[in-house]
Amino acid sequence: METTVLVVGGGATGAGVARDLAMRGVDVTLVERGRFAGGTSGRSHGLLHSGARYAVDDPEGAEDCLVENRILKEIAPHCVTDTGGYFLQVTGDDPDYFDRKREACETIGIETGVIDIETARREEPDLADGVERVLGVPDAVVHPTRLTAANAADAREHGACLLPETEVRDVVRDGERVVGAVVDDGSGERPIDAEHVVNATGAWAGQLGELAGVEIEMAPTSGVMVAVEFEGLDTVLNRARPAADGDIVVPHDEQVVLGTTSVDVEDPDEFSTDDAEIGRTFEECSTMLAGLDRDRIDRVYWGVRPLYTEDRERYEGRQISRGFYLLDHDARDGIDGLTTIVGGKLTTYRRMAEAVSDHVADRLGVEEPSRTAETPLVGHDDPGRIDALVREFGASNPADEDVVSWE
């Protein structure tokens, strides 16, 4: 099999890269070792960031989130629930941090408003008693399985070849150039020849790098999400304090997803999970939302963040930037034909995909620009179609399995 670009990794970013390049007329093949969104994307809390979470410590990253938040609400309304969000100051929290958060958001251009507590409690009656101040922000909820399926299907409609349940066994080099990969779909190994390979495997990027003979210093962290049966919350809740365990509550139709923790891991496939993380997340989120019942926990799952740092001895866990990094292995390692995208977050998947696609298109001499920011995703005008695509791809993932229709 031959293709111009082989994209490895069928999460939101990889599917986004395949879509972007296919829309430019590039022959693309997307391979994913499991089901689409089966890795980090489908094991996230599903918060579509407004940028407010990062406004104090990472204003540039916050600006990226704000831009992508607005774009996704336009191009993927069938994958987004526009809930709005609250940042909550709880008894014992530093009031100065609340003020810094508001000021930082205003500087960036994130629309905010201090909401008096009586109004907030009328809108969300289940706010915990300890909530003292409320800042409204334009957060939303994104359903990652739908989003990834829409990108993959859109890529296919523009001519891309989709190969889920297909694992890369080796990366093929001709001297100092990557020229393809050997894959296995369960029926045996076969080669795919490619002019360029994109490593969009997220937390597994280091493993694919090893196959290609390059070192990629990943610093993945795991985090727990706890889905609890709970009706009536319509707004994303965030704790107005520096990022810590148990500071996000994401509403679904009849559930809420509580998140999250941050624990360094060496292997994204093999890491320990501690029930204490569940208890800590539940306890911390209960300071924002009253009425959570441990007996109504529906599912618990861990995701692994694809964090990257060139100085892991100095930085770890929450100290590592949530920004994304494009690794040009020709300039970096002297290996042509390979590009890696690491870091980032679900909210910025499209921007990450555009950055990679711009780079690859330049290498291939393709002059067609990206059109993903203004072109609606497949299914935007037929909401029922998106879940049919999810079913077609067999993409059941814990982040949103309670929301996606399987009938």
Image (cartoon, helix red, strand yellow):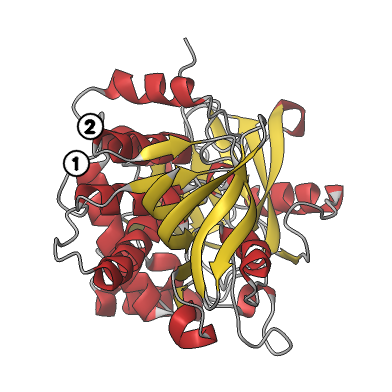
Q: Residue furthest top?
A: 407
Viewer-nearest residue: 171 or 300: 171
**Residue 122 to residue 402: above or below:** below
For the residue marked with disc 1, what is the amino acid? Pro
**Residue 145: x, y in percent?**
47, 36
Answer with the quarter of the image where residue 59 lies.
Answer: bottom left
The secondary structure type at the circle numbered 1 is loop
- The crowding category of the residue bearing disc 2, from other C-alpha atoms within 10 Å (few below 14, some 14 to 19, many at least 20), is some
Q: Which residue is mark 1?
A: 376
**Residue 250: x, y in percent?**
50, 44
Left or right of 340? Residue 113 is left
Q: Which residue is mark 2?
A: 380
Residue under the point 45% across and 76% down:
336
**Residue 78 to residue 357: above or below:** above
**Residue 376: x, y in percent?**
19, 41
Viewer-nearest residue: 79 or 342: 342
The answer to whether residue 48 is seen in the rendering is: no
For the residue marked with disc 2, what is the amino acid? His
Answer with the quarter of the image where residue 33 lies.
Answer: top right
Left or right of 153? Residue 288 is right
Check contact, mark 2 vs mark 1: CB within 8 A: yes
Q: Which label number is shown at residue 213?
A: none
